[in-house]
Image: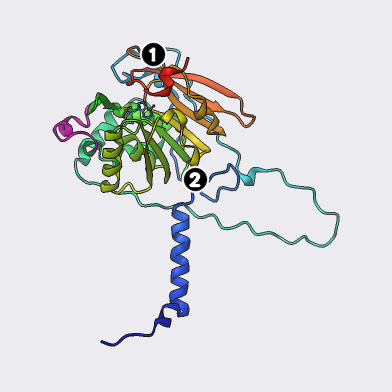
Amino acid sequence: MHLRPLHWLFTGGQLAVAVAMALAVALVFHCARSDQARPIRQAARSGAATSGPAELVAAEAGVAPNPTGSGAASSAGAPSARGQPQGPVPATSEKPPVKQAPEEKPLTWERPRFQERKAERLRMVAGQIEARGVKDGAVVEAMREVPRHRFVPDNRQGAAYADGPQPIGYGQTISQPYVVALMTELLNLKPGDRVLEIGTGSGYQAAVLSELTPCVYTVEILPELAQQAADRLRKLGYKTVETRQSDGYYGWKEHAPFDAIIVTAAAGHVPPPLIEQLKPGGRIVVPIGGVYETQDLVVVTKDMDGRLRTRSVLPVTFVPMTGEVQKEK
Ligand code: SAH
């Protein structure tokens, strides 16, 4: 057999290809940790957050919408580095050296695509989600793409696109499609935003989030569900989602701070570690209320000075958040 000398690996052209590939990988996994200098072009999004969930039908258990909950305008994101005021102009006739801004590149990452049961998904989106006022184009598109039937037990696949929550075992449920879409819209995500989900469950909500940003971190307290969801997400090709089995009360410090946090189990209050792990300018979407009663779907925003504001969007019914939050007063 003819062996080629090893130095062929380092010919100029191949080295260039290797460097280009390394850069592409870095781009795919760039998840902005700071609010500044995010080199990401925002994906085209058609319209702002929903303006009127109050007129919409049901929450999880078909409860009446909150008549006062019409203030679902999207929260403002952090200012971009390009929006900063300019410094003083130097007093010289010579032109100062021009620092070229690096060319902005769109963030790209792999997102699996499924034709199976596509017609059912399109009907679900038109009839349950767009019809109730979810307008964000990227969110609507995500709901059209993620194969919800692959996140429910085999014997429930036929009901996966129905207008309600579905059992996923261990006494837990995958939320109603409309609630998944609404909560996702309220997070107001841009590609490159870091988002933390508490309550992985089936992994469906995490998959929907991963259509909008490659930086999705999700935590599940029940070991069996955490393992199943991790396997399912990997097998389906949602490779950018990072999963962990732990009590979401404590967030996920190693990946903080987050632009957005979504809690998909009901808590009596927002766990303080989640507030700490939220960036200034960020938001938490969480059902707040007692167990076995209707809760309020709440958006908590942290302004640039760290001040919190809370607004109530819709009555909902979620399974309870367990662990530390139930012990705390
Ligand atoms: N988002 C899920 C559904 C959530 S059901 C989906 O798309 O399928 C609520 C989940 O929250 C359950 O799986 C429950 O086990 C989990 N959970 C409850 N308390 C939790 C806690 N303290 N930390 C993390 N997960 C929790």
Does residue 202 appear left or right of residue 277 in this picture?
Answer: left
6 sits left or right of 162 in the view: right
State the image coordinates of residue 157 (x, y, percent, origin top left).
Answer: 17, 34
Image depth: mark 2 or mark 1 in front? 1
Q: Note whether 13 is above or below 233 in the view shown.
A: below
Q: Is residue 26 above or below residue 300?
A: below
Q: Does mark 2's beta carbon lie closer than 8 Å to ligand 1? A: no
Q: CA distance from mark 2 to mark 1?
A: 38 Å
- 80 and 7: which one is in front? 7
Asked whether 161 falls inside the magenta stretch, the response is yes
Left or right of 177? Residue 45 is: right
Earlier sequence position, callout 2 versus callout 1 = 2
User: Where is residue 291 shown, x and y percent of the image?
Assistant: 35, 14
Question: Which residue is found at the position 73% from the left and 46% from the top?
Answer: 86
**Which residue is at 46% across, 66% downward?**
20
In the image, residue 66 above or below residue 150: above
Secondary structure category for the residue under label 2? loop
Which corner quadrant of the figure contains ligand 1?
top left
Residue at left 24%, top 46%?
Answer: 114
Part of the protein shown in magenta: 151-162
Q: Position of residue 233 (x, y in %)?
A: 29, 43
**Residue placed under numbered mark 1 in the picture:** 290
Where is mark 2, residue-wise?
42
